[in-house]
Structure formats: structure tokens, C-alpha cells
């Protein structure tokens, strides 16, 4: 039987394979040592990173504490400056970025009947004005308005609108907010409410009502609110232009009541003061002014008015109306000359889908003995020409609001009236388009 083969020491087969065993063993040892070295190096790197992260966190905390301390020191320094009487300069400097400059305007096309102010139609700048508002000191502010054009303007001359110093919240002296505020300068006459939406961007129509009560003149105004009630009262020059400084003064005021967010009521009163016969009132009426209509014997005239306003609002529209009485008086000899004017206006606006809206307005005025009422008529013909006893206007409008800063409008208005003596006014209908904007 054959014995198993046994490798003998020093056999030729072992002698032939020992280099392979040596090489395998060497590389295995090297790989093992390298792996151990790599693991040692990785452990050291992780430990170092952890130590550096801890140091960085400590530095961030120290820097944060130093920043908080610095902020407290700066705040204390500013407070001490204001307490020590240096309030004027720091407050003025901090409010420089609160100066606000803005503007509004309306551009479009207008055309009237053959006896209106634009029988051939014309492109025109309906409204353009620049505003500037800036803080002065604490609750004192400056407001200025430069008027480049306005509805009813007879030329393109540059005019000064409102410009005043406003003293807000005077009532804080007796610990009440907004009960008393004051304006000194040139302001709108606070009679009625239509003048508040007369600018192109605020008026849903292109035209105003037939009455169009408004005026701007120097004086002093007080206003505030008492719960659901508001008030405004002003004493101002009664005459228009440079001649308004002399003579009697205009007095006007309004009291408002807002029982809730849907309803608003107000009552207004106004008196122009006694004006010289050659003067015009600062208050506009029917696209003109109050003027003397007496004979050459009249040297003084005045006008007064009382009005009530009401507005009801719902989510997609509103209805508003106003009406009142105005009186004219002069010292024409031998018995004087007086006229009673009764007027009213009603407006309905309804918002439609896709940013459209529709609006209509009807307004009318009566005066038995006649009074100057221009309306859409030619100013020279109807302000100094025959007096008008009755005039009405029906306006129909459609608008599209891109936003509260850009509105497109189109309007057609019918206007009819009667002059003293019975002649009809039926050739003054109005058509217009307008793009109103503000910035």
C-alpha cells in the first residue's frame, strides 16, 4: 500500500515556494500596520475638530455678549442726549427718511355739446398735483401741495393748493388722543364732503356733481374726534385770490357721526363773510364762484349754506347723497337783493367682476330768481351771462381699477336747465375718458 506523501524538511518543493510565503506575509503585515495608523490618525483628527468647535462656540458667545453690551451703551447714550435737551437734532436727523413726496393726476379726452366748454372736443390734463409731507418737531408736520391742473381750471397756471403746519394730538396735554388737532396755513374749506373725493384718483366719475362745493384759502383749522363723532371747523379768508386778505372772514365747519362701519352722517355749515362787490368768493359753486349779482349800487355781498350728507356702504359698493340750502344776499339799494338756492345729489356705485365698476350720479339745483351756475357750459357765457333758475345733471360711468393707483374711466352726462326768462339749456352734454393715477 502506498504511503501518503510527506513533505520533508529541506525538500525541493518547500524551497521553491518560500519566497511567495514571505511576500504574502510582508504585505499582510504592512496593510495591517497601515490600517492601524489610519485609524489612529482619523481618531486624532476627530478629537482636534471637536476641540476647535468647542473653542469657536465659546468665542461666538463672548462676541454676542460684547455686542449686547455695546447696543445697551448706544441706547443709553441716545436717551441721555434727548433728556439733556439735544432732542431737536437727533429727532430731525432720524426722521429725514420719513419725508414723503407723491403725486396724483388725470389725463384724458373731453367733449361737450355746442354750448359747452369743449364743443370741438379736446385732450386735456384734468388733474395734476405734487405733494410733500415731512415731520418738523415731535407731533408737528409740514404739508404742501402744488397744483398743476384741476377740474374746472380756466387756464394752465401753476397754483398753490394746501400748504400748512399741522399740530397733531394737542389733546395729549390732557391725556386724550386725537381730540384736538390744528392746522395753520392754506386749507380746503371744510364744507360738505364732495371736496374730499374731488381729485381724479378718488372720484369714481370724471366730472363732479352739479353743485361742486369746494375752495382753498388761508386760515386756521381745528379738527378731532370724540368717540363716534368727528368735527372740523375753520376760519379763513372769504374771498378768492390776493384780495382775500381784507374784509370779513369765512367760517365753515362739519360734524360727522359714524355709528358703525356701514353708515356715515354729517352736517355742515358755511358763511363766506361780507365781500366787496368786485371780489369773488373763495368757495366754488356750480363750476364757478359766488359773485355779486346786484346793480352798481351794491357794494357788499355774502353767501351762506347748510348741508347734510349720508353714506351707506356694503362690501361691493355704496350709495351716498347730500342736500341743502344756500342763500345769497347783498346791499343793493333800496331794499337789498336775496336769493334762496336748494340743491341735492345722489350717487350709487357697484363693483363688478374683473375689477370693473359702474356708477351713476344725479344732481340738481333750483333758484327762483336765478343765480350764476356754469355747469358744463362755457364759463364766459354762463358765469357773467344770463342767470340760471334750474339745472340738473345725470352722469353714467364705467371704470376699471388696475389697482388703487391706476384707474380707467369713461363717462357720459346729460345736462339740462332753464335760464331766467325761460330759455332752455340743452346743448351741454358731456362725454369723457380718463386715466387717473397716483404715486
Image (cartoon, helix red, strand yellow):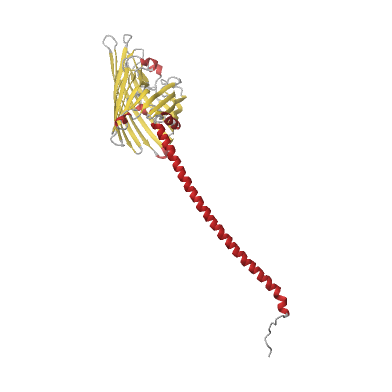
Q: Compared with residue 84, is residue 327 higher up or lower down, i.e. above or below?
A: above
Figure quadrant of residue 154: top left
The answer to whether residue 211 is left or right of residue 400 is left
Residue drawn 66% across the image and 71% down it: 25
Q: Where is residue 278 in the image (x, y as percent from the top left)?
A: 36, 12
Q: Nearer the viewer, residue 408 or 227?
A: 227
Figure quadrant of residue 112: top left
Task: Give the mark count.
Answer: 0
Quarter holding the C terminus is top left
In the rendered image, the residue lying farthest to the left is: 335
Residue drawn 27% across the image and 9% down it: 334
Figure quadrant of residue 323: top left
Quarter holding the N terminus is bottom right
Q: Compared with residue 138, is residue 336 higher up or lower down, i.e. above or below?
A: above
Q: Where is residue 196 in the image (x, y as percent from the top left)?
A: 36, 28
Q: Position of residue 301 (x, y in %)?
A: 31, 14
Q: Is residue 360 visible?
A: yes
Residue drawn 52% across the image and 55% down it: 50
Q: Is residue 422 visible?
A: no
Q: Position of residue 308 (x, y in %)?
A: 29, 27
Q: Compared with residue 177, is residue 28 higher up or lower down, i.e. above or below?
A: below
Q: Compared with residue 21, is residue 173 higher up or lower down, i.e. above or below?
A: above
Q: Nearer the viewer, residue 133 or 108?
A: 133
Amino acid at each position: 500500500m502506498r504511503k501518503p506523501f510527506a513533505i520533508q524538511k529541506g525538500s525541493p518543493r518547500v524551497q521553491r515556494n518560500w519566497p511567495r510565503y514571505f511576500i504574502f506575509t510582508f504585505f499582510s503585515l504592512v496593510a495591517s500596520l497601515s490600517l492601524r495608523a489610519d485609524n489612529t490618525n482619523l481618531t486624532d483628527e476627530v478629537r482636534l475638530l471637536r476641540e476647535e468647535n468647542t473653542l469657536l462656540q465659546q468665542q461666538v458667545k463672548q462676541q454676542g455678549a460684547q455686542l449686547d453690551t455695546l447696543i445697551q451703551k448706544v441706547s443709553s447714550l441716545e436717551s441721555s442726549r434727548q433728556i439733556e435737551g439735544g432732542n431737536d437734532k437727533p429727532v430731525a436727523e432720524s426722521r429725514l427718511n420719513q419725508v414723503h413726496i407723491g403725486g396724483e393726476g388725470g389725463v384724458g379726452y373731453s367733449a361737450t355739446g355746442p354750448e359747452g366748454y369743449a364743443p370741438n372736443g379736446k385732450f386735456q390734463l384734468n388733474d395734476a398735483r405734487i405733494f410733500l409731507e415731512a415731520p418738523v418737531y415731535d407731533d408737528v408736520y409740514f404739508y404742501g401741495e402744488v397744483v398743476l391742473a384741476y377740474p374746472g381750471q380756466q387756464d394752465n397756471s401753476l397754483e398753490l393748493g394746501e400748504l400748512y403746519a399741522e399740530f397733531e394730538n394737542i389733546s395729549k396735554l390732557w391725556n386724550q388722543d386725537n381730540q384736538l388737532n390744528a392746522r395753520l396755513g392754506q386749507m380746503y374749506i371744510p364744507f360738505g364732503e364732495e371736496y374730499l373725493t374731488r381729485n381724479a384718483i378718488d372720484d369714481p366719475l370724471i366730472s363732479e356733481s352739479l353743485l361742486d362745493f369746494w375752495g382753498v384759502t388761508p386760515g386756521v383749522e381745528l379738527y378731532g374726534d370724540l368717540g363716534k363723532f368727528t368735527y372740523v371747523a375753520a376760519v379763513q379768508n372769504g374771498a378768492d385770490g390776493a384780495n382775500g386778505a381784507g374784509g370779513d372772514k369765512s367760517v365753515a365747519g362739519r360734524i360727522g357721526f359714524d355709528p358703525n362701519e356701514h353708515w356715515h352722517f354729517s352736517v355742515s355749515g358755511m358763511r363766506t363773510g361780507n365781500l366787496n362787490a368786485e371780489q369773488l368768493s373763495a368757495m366754488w359753486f356750480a363750476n364757478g364762484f359766488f359773485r355779486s349779482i346786484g346793480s352798481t349800487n351794491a357794494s357788499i355781498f355774502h353767501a351762506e349754506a347748510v348741508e347734510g350728507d349720508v353714506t351707506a356702504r356694503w362690501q361691493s359698493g355704496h350709495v351716498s347723497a347730500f342736500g341743502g340750502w344756500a342763500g345769497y344776499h347783498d346791499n343793493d339799494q333800496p331794499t337789498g337783493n336775496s336769493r334762496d338756492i336748494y340743491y341735492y345729489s345722489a350717487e350709487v356705485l357697484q363693483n363688478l367682476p374683473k375689477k370693473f365698476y359702474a356708477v351713476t350720479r344725479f344732481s340738481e339745483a333750483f333758484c327762483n330768481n336765478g343765480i350764476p351756475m356754469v355747469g358744463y357750459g362755457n364759463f364766459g357765457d354762463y358765469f357773467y351771462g344770463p342767470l340760471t333758475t334750474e339745472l340738473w345733471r345725470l352722469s353714467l360711468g364705467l371704470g376699471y381699477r388696475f389697482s388703487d393707483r391706476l384707474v380707467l374711466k369713461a363717462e357720459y352726462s346729460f345736462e339740462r336747465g332753464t335760464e331766467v326768462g325761460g330759455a332752455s339749456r340743452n346743448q351741454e352734454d358731456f362725454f369723457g375718458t380718463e386715466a387717473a393715477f397716483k404715486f
